[in-house]
Image (cartoon, rainbow, N blue to C red):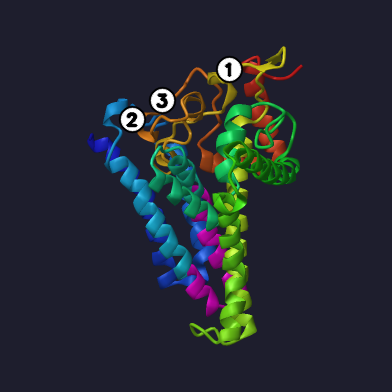
Amino acid sequence: MRFSDLRFLLALILPMLGMFGLVMAPQNAFVSTLVVWFSVVLLELLLPKNSPFPLADEQAVGYFQWVLRLYVVLQMALIALGAYFAMHAEWLIVLGIAFSVGYITGSQGITFAHELGHSKSKIDRFCGWLLMTSVCYGHFMVEHYRGHHPRAATFDDPASARFGESFYRFLPRTLWGSLASGWRLEAQRLVQMKSAWRKSPLLWSAVASFSLIVLPFLMLFGQFAGVESAQTAMKLVVFFVFQSIVAFTLLELVNYIEHYGLQRHTEGGKREAFGKMHAWNSDTLITNSLLANLQRHSDHHMHAWKPYPTLQDTPEGPRLPTGYAGSIVLAAIPPLWFALMHPRLEALNLKPS
């Protein structure tokens, strides 16, 4: 392992920083999160634009996967700590705590669930399900692998943004489309495997997410774990639901920027193979270190089973104006996003006629 590969330990710092902030000043959680977010944006602009070269496949073992597994433990602790402080906070602070936790569970938690789900290890895939269940988005674990990967950068994919489509038009389409597709694909799998719904991880994930929402009220009626009022129970519910909303909204912002305006051609009912020109990439050091090289997105789609430290940059392909942290801010402002992205599509001769 090279010294430069220690950068992936940055992934563990963010949830620990989040927990430290909750313990020290939960009333400042919202502002503190914005400071962290925009600090990353600034660092992306100031630091070198290229991450270290990837490892060879045979080197991508051990340490790299344990970083992801250790993160799972930290996220569970972060959510529990956030719930504890939300129980005892004023309503505005509850929302701030939920935003702070959701920023981490969305930006890192979903990213690592995505990486763990691509693993061939059953334990890793279980950890991926656990992370997605904690943000009420378990269907991602079906739709992403069996839906998005085959259909990315086509009109058939609800997670691929079309040319001229703002994020605010994209969001309801992808939320409903991904949910419906995930359950439909799981139903098809169960028929093919001659299996029953009681054996479906998607069903159990949905049940677990729903249980986490209703659990505070069950605790209320049982006077269990110190929950003594309906207001306290409601704070727990709002915290969990709002952090989930923040998390999967961040996911969909990332989905929006990853394939915006890019389209694979279909001839004779057969899709063009996914290539370097079908995903937007960036190689900024901080975000690639925090998000397991997610910004090397073209290579990920072309080689879905490659471990994250082996992913390669594709500088000849579409390039985002900055890293993901900054690009999702730009995507939230449609006129600015279009002004920056459409000239890039034209320069690559990728703008639809």
The residue singled out by tag 3 in the image is 312
The residue singled out by tag 1 in the image is 273
Residue 254 at x, y percent in the picture: 58, 40
Question: Does the magenta run of residues contain 104?
Answer: yes
Work out which quarter of the rendered image holds the N terminus and state it: top left
State which tag comes first along the sequence, 2 or 1: 2
Label 1 Cα crowd, 10 Å radius (few <14 / some 14-19 / many 20+): few
Outermost residue on the front side: it is: 194
- Check disc 1 and give the amino acid type: Ala
Question: Does the magenta run of residues contain 206?
Answer: no
Task: Read off the magenta span.
Answer: 82-107
**Count of number-bearing discs:** 3
State which tag comes first along the sequence, 2 or 3: 2
State which tag comes first along the sequence, 3 or 1: 1
Res 217 → quadrant: bottom right
Callout 2–callout 1 Cβ contact below 8 Å: no
Res 334 → quadrant: top right
Res 6 → quadrant: top left
* Residue 126 image label: none
Residue 220 at x, y percent in the picture: 59, 83
Residue 142 visible (yes or no): yes
> Whole-Å distance between the Cαs marked 3 and 1?
18 Å
- SS type, badge 3: loop
- SS type, badge 2: loop
Label 2 Cα crowd, 10 Å radius (few <14 / some 14-19 / many 20+): some
